[in-house]
Structures are given as structure tokens and as C-alpha cells.
């Protein structure tokens, strides 16, 4: 069958022509003229039609029909170039299609392929006009794409590239052809062709194409979109998520591309493992990508374990915006979220997170449910055990206390008694703690225990004691006595505190005043303080009575009356008391009256009042036997011997009771 062609050069300028498939015309690359190829035939195109059918059958892997049509071609014209191309195509498809031929047939077929290809090259090493006309006639992209693959396997770049320009990938309907052509396009960096093939999703092996694209398609900014197109077909099964996980784990693609792929997979029900998503996307991503990936993931039904992993990321990622996005995604998922206290504690203990970010995270966290027990644990840990600096702690402590309705007694006791890190800020914190709804009866021992502690500096301790007393806390009777006797506080502070404690319900024991007298020195005694703790129920020991009588310099207006009251309430027999005093260089052992007479520094009036009471009221003897530096004698003898050295008060008493009279 003979075919005659019009010349392929532009008939206006002799320039080179380019085939425009949509219009089925040729266009001059130089002057732009459009030329329609004209063919004149001496017979019908029967053989071309048979070649077309054989090639189409090969494209669709209908190999029996392809063989029959190839045989028909050979009958019509075995030397026609189309017959040769159809034969090459049929043989190559046979050996590349699994199960199309027996293994023992492969070698003979390849030998025949080599022979036929040699014959094709004998026609021409380039595309002749006759061959070009055949390609135009074949027209179907399934056939042309198959020929591209055949020529590529033969290493015939000239014919391969010529036919490639005639393909419209949108019109390829053979799944095997599309699958193989995609592999060819990606391998040869024909990205536009690859994109057209991927877009033709209804005529492609999606899983095979997905693997090919994920492994070999360049990460040029559109890779994620191409994979999304494949995933959107719903052709993949749930177990195919492993393909996505492998891609995320091993691909060198950008995080942005991986995130788009992961999100698309999740949106199609292929729930990738969160650990993989975290390690290879989220932890390496910026805020926008974190939101994209986690938003998709949180729209699924996720496990409690995955919820904790997302929370852990939020508190550990070190980026406040990413953290807030993660928490927002969880919140928007409307899934039940109970934040583990240990995560919040760990976040607040992280020195890499600044205080404003910690507060922002706390704000976000409180949008979820945090039960009272968990909040109490969080508050206690930060308040009592967190080791941030004082300056860093203050805003967090203030924030937590602002949210607290009440605070457990265990937390309050631990903070007040054991925590000193807040330094000068501690009193204000204690003030805030006790502004909450606390049951004060739970803190009966707190003030006593705190006063006995050495946790804080004296200045801080004084301030906190004042706060606790103002809040209504009281101390035990024993601790109150210890405070009265041993506290270094100044007198006004002591008096205010004692008055407050009494008002709060603290009891002054009957021996409070007695103990005070026993332990005070003349210089440390306070008449005002003593009168405050000297109550109608006060009882006094012999030692207290002796100390007050002999050594305490009290107000002259009350000394006499106090002596009477003290001795009347004495729990022992004052007549049995033997006092040991130093007088004029002598050690004198005597009764209370004699001792008072010798050593008193009271005024003459007070001295006489006291002596008179001791003699008439308590029946003590002034001129009883005394021991002076080991020698016994009457007091009269001693004072007469030392009369010039006696004090005014002593002289007055001795005169009053005729101790200097020779006839006494």
C-alpha cells in the first residue's frame, strides 16, 4: 500500500513545523503559519486500522487479540513499518507483563525484539514522513503512550521524544499504561507529564502510583498536592497507612510536604501513628504546619494515650504558639481531656519556659477539666517544692492562688513551716493563702509550730506571725509562755501579740506569770507585761516568789500589792524557804524576810510595806538565826555589826522593828 505525503516544511517560509494535536494541524515555528497535512491514498487504509487495533490491544493487555491483529497486519503487508512497530510492541508487552509468557519464552522473544528493532532502524534512524503519518493516524493516547514506553525500553530516544509530544495524558485509559508512563515520566523528570497522569486518577493503579510518587517525585512544592490527589480517590485500604508512615519516617522531603501528605491521609481515614507524626513532622514544624497536622489528627477518634502525647508536646515543645495550637486542636476535637497533673508540674518546673508563657499555658490548660484534687496537687508542688527564683515564682504563685477557692491544710502547713524560697514575698503569699475559704480549726497548731521553727529570717517570721495572729490563729498555752519568756520581739510587739492570742482564744496557764518571774532577770523584767499575764487564776512557785521579792525592780505603786498577791498564791510554804544572798561580801543564808531586808533596792515606803506583810501576814521572823559565811548568828547581831553599811531601806526596816535596840 503506497502513501504519498505533502512536504513537512512550511510552504510559506520553509520553516520547521510542530504538530498541534488538538487541531490536527502543523504550525510553523518560524512564521506561525498553520498547515494541514494532506495525504493522498491509492487504496483504503486497512493496514493502518489493523495496526492501530493491535497496538490498542497491547496497550490494554488484550494479548490474544493483539496477536491476531498482528498476524492480520503481516498478511496485508509484512514489510510495512506499522507492522514492524506493532510486532515490537506486542513482544515487549509480553515479556514485561507478569504471566503473559512462560519464563522459557523470554529469551527467544527478546532475540526477536532485537532483530525487529534492527530492521526498524534499517528503515531510518529518525522518524520518516511515513512513520510520522502513522503516529498521526494512530491518534489514541493509550497507543502513543505505549509506544513511548516501548521506544524508551529500546533506548530509541529520537522516536520516544517525537511520540511523547503527541500524547494527551488526560486521554489515557489503560491502567497499566498510565502506571508505567508515570514511572517513566518521573524517572525522566517530565513533571508536567507526570502531573497529567496523576490527575487522571480514575485510570491509574493508585497504590502503585502513590509509592512511585512518594519515593521518586521531586519535592518541588507540588508533591504534597499530587499525593493528596491520589489519596482522595479512597482506593487505599486502612493498612496502607503503613506506606504513609514509611514515607514520613524515611523521606528527605520538607516538613511542609510531609505534613500535607499526613493530613491528607488522616482525612481519608488512614490514621498514621502519632509517634511517627510527632517525630517526623510536628516536632520539626512551624506553627502553621503543627496546626495543619494536629487539626487533621484530632478530628479522628483518638486514644487517651494519644491525647497525653499531644499534651506532652504542648508542654515540652518550647514554642508557646505551637503549644497553644496543640491545645486548641484538642479542645476543638470535643474529646474528653483530663490533663495529668504531672505534665503541668513538669511544665512549671521547666526553666526553658519563661513565666509569661507558663501563665499562657496555664490559661489554655484551664479551658479543659482539671479536678480539685489535681489542682491541689499542682498548687502544692509549685508553692512548696518548685525551685524557681523568687522573682520568677511570684507571678505563677499569684496566678495559682487567684484561681484557688480553698487550699488544703497539708499544703498550707507545708508552705508556712518548710518553704523559705519566697523570702520577703512570703508574708504577702501567706496573706493571700489565708484570704481563701480556709477552716481555721484545721490550723490549731500552725502558729505554735511556726513560732518554734527556724525556716525564715526574723523579719519574715515576725511578719508572718503577725498575719497568722490577725487571721485568728492561736498558740498553745505552753507555746504562749515560751513566747512571753524567750521571744526577742520588742515589748510593744510582745504585748500586742499576747493580747491578740488571748482574743483569739489562747489560754494563759495558771503558771504563766510564775514562769515569767522564774526566768526573768532584773533587766529583762517588764512591769507592763507582767501585769498583762498576771490573772486571777495565776499561781506562783516559791522560786518565782523569791525572784520577784528579792531581785525584780517593779513599779513602786504596785510592788507591795504584787508581793502580797504572789505570796498569797504561792503553791509552797514560804516559811520553809532558805534564801542565799550576798551582802557586804558575805554569803548569807536566811529566810525570805531577812533576805529581802538585806538586799532590797525598793523605796523605804515599799520596803516597810513588804516587811510588815511578811511579818504580820506570813509570820516570818526578822531576828531569826542566819548563817553568815558559815557562822550562825542572829540577824540583829549581823546588822548591828554592819549598821554603817546598810541601805536606807534596810535601816528603815531595822529601825521599824528595833533591830538596833540593845533591849530587843
Image (tube, helix red, strand yellow):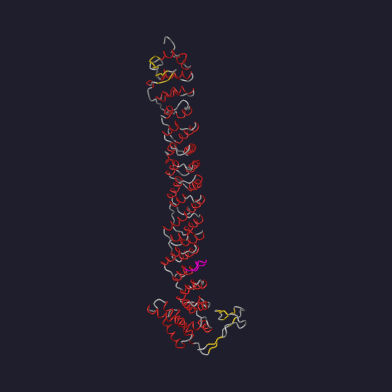
Question: Does the magenta segment cover residue 217?
Answer: yes
- Give percent across and percent down for residue 321: 51, 56
Viewer-nearest residue: 117 or 252: 117
- Does 634 appear above or below 286? above
Q: Which residue, as the protein is rendered here, is positioned at the far top? A: 663
Viewer-nearest residue: 70 or 518: 70
Q: Quadrant of the C terminus?
A: top left
- Give percent across and percent down for residue 100: 40, 78
Q: How many marks?
A: 0
Viewer-nearest residue: 638 or 547: 638
Residue 205 shows in this picture: yes
- Does 394 appear above or below 75? above
- Does 440 appear above or below 38? above
- Give percent across and percent down for residue 633: 39, 14
Question: Does the magenta segment cover residue 337?
Answer: no
Magenta segment, which residues? 216-226
Residue 597 shows in this picture: no
- Does 267 appear above or below 421? below
Q: Quadrant of residue 574?
A: top left
Q: Quadrant of residue 447?
A: top left
- Give percent across and percent down for residue 205: 44, 73
Viewer-nearest residue: 454 or 484: 454
Amino acid at each position: 500500500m503506497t502513501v504519498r505525503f505533502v512536504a513537512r516544511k512550511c510552504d510559506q517560509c520553509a520553516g520547521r513545523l510542530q504538530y498541534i494535536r488538538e487541531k490536527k494541524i502543523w504550525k510553523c515555528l518560524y512564521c506561525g503559519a498553520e498547515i494541514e497535512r494532506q495525504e493522498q491514498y491509492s487504496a483504503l487504509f486497512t493496514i493502518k486500522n489493523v495496526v492501530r487495533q493491535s497496538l490498542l490491544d497491547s496497550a490494554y493487555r488484550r494479548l490474544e487479540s493483539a496477536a491476531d491483529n498482528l498476524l492480520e497486519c503481516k498478511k496485508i503487508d509484512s514489510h510495512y513499518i506499522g507492522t514492524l512497530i506493532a510486532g515490537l510492541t506486542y513482544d515487549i508487552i509480553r515479556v514485561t507483563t507478569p504471566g503473559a509468557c512462560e519464563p522459557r519464552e523470554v529469551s527467544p522473544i527478546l532475540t526477536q525484539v532485537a532483530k525487529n528493532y534492527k530492521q526498524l532502524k534499517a528503515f531510518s534512524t529518525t522518524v520518516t514522513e511515513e512513520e510520522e503519518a502513522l503516529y498521526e493516524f494512530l491518534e489514541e493516547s493509550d497507543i502513543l503512550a505505549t509506544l513511548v514506553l516501548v521506544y524508551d525500553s529500546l533506548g530509541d530516544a529520537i522516536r520516544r521524544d517525537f511520540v511523547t509530544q503527541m500524547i494527551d495524558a488526560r486521554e489515557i485509559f489503560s491502567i497499566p499504561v498510565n502506571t508505567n508512563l508515570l514511572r517513566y515520566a518521573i524517572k525522566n523528570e517530565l513533571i508536567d507529564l507526570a502531573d497529567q497522569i496523576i490527575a487522571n486518577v480514575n485510570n491509574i493503579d493508585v497504590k502503585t502510583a502513590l509509592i512511585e510518587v512518594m519515593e521518586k517525585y521531586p519535592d518541588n512544592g507540588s508533591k504534597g498536592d499530587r499525593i493528596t490527589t491520589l489519596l482522595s480517590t479512597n482506593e487505599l485500604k486502612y493498612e496502607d497507612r503503613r506506606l504513609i508512615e514509611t514515607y514520613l519516617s524515611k523521606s528527605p522531603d520538607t516538613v511542609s510536604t510531609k505534613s500535607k501528605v499526613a493530613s491528607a491521609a488522616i482525612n481519608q481515614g488512614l490514621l498514621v501513628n502519632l509517634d511517627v507524626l510527632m517525630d517526623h513532622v510536628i516536632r520539626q514544624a512551624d506553627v502553621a504546619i503543627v496546626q495543619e497536622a494536629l487539626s487533621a489528627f484530632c478530628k479522628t477518634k483518638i486514644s487517651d494515650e494519644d491525647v497525653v502525647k499531644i499534651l506532652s508536646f504542648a508542654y515540652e515543645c518550647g514554642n508557646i504558639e505551637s503549644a497553644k495550637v496543640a491545645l486548641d486542636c484538642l479542645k476543638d476535637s470535643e474529646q474528653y481531656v483530663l490533663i495529668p497533673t504531672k505534665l503541668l508540674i513538669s511544665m512549671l518546673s521547666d526553666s526553658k519556659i519563661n513565666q509569661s508563657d507558663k501563665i499562657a499555658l496555664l490559661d489554655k490548660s484551664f479551658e479543659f477539666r482539671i479536678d480539685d484534687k489535681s489542682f491541689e496537687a499542682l498548687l502544692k508542688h509549685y508553692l512548696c517544692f518548685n525551685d524557681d527564683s523568687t522573682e520568677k515564682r511570684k507571678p505563677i504563685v499569684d496566678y495559682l492562688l487567684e484561681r484557688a477557692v480553698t487550699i488544703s491544710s497539708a499544703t498550707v502547713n507545708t508552705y508556712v513551716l518548710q518553704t523559705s524560697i519566697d523570702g520577703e514575698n512570703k508574708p504577702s503569699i501567706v496573706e493571700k493563702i489565708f484570704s481563701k475559704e480556709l477552716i481555721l480549726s484545721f490550723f490549731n497548731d500552725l502558729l505554735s509550730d511556726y513560732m518554734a521553727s527556724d525556716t525564715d529570717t526574723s523579719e519574715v517570721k515576725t511578719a508572718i506571725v503577725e498575719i497568722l495572729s490577725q487571721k485568728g490563729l492561736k498558740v498553745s498555752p505552753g507555746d504562749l509562755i515560751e513566747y512571753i519568756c524567750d521571744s526577742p520581739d520588742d515589748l510593744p510587739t510582745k504585748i500586742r501579740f499576747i493580747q491578740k492570742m488571748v482574743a483569739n482564744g489562747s489560754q494563759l496557764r495558771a503558771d504563766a506569770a510564775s514562769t515569767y518571774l522564774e526566768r526573768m532577770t532584773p533587766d529583762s523584767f517588764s512591769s507592763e507585761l507582767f501585769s498583762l499575764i498576771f490573772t486571777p487564776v495565776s499561781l506562783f512557785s516559791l522560786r518565782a516568789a523569791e525572784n520577784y521579792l528579792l531581785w525584780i525592780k517593779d513599779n513602786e505603786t504596785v510592788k507591795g500589792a504584787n508581793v502580797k498577791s504572789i505570796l498569797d498564791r504561792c503553791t509552797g510554804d514560804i516559811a520553809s524557804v532558805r534564801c542565799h544572798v550576798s551582802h557586804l561580801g558575805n554569803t548569807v543564808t536566811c529566810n525570805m524576810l531577812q533576805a529581802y531586808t538585806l538586799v532590797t533596792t525598793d523605796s523605804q515606803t515599799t520596803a516597810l510595806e513588804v516587811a510588815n506583810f511578811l511579818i504580820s501576814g506570813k509570820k516570818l521572823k526578822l531576828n531569826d538565826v542566819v548563817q553568815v559565811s558559815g557562822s550562825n548568828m542572829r540577824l540583829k547581831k549581823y546588822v548591828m555589826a554592819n549598821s554603817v553599811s546598810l541601805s536606807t531601806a534596810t535601816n528603815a526596816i531595822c529601825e521599824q522593828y528595833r533591830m538596833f535596840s540593845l533591849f530587843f
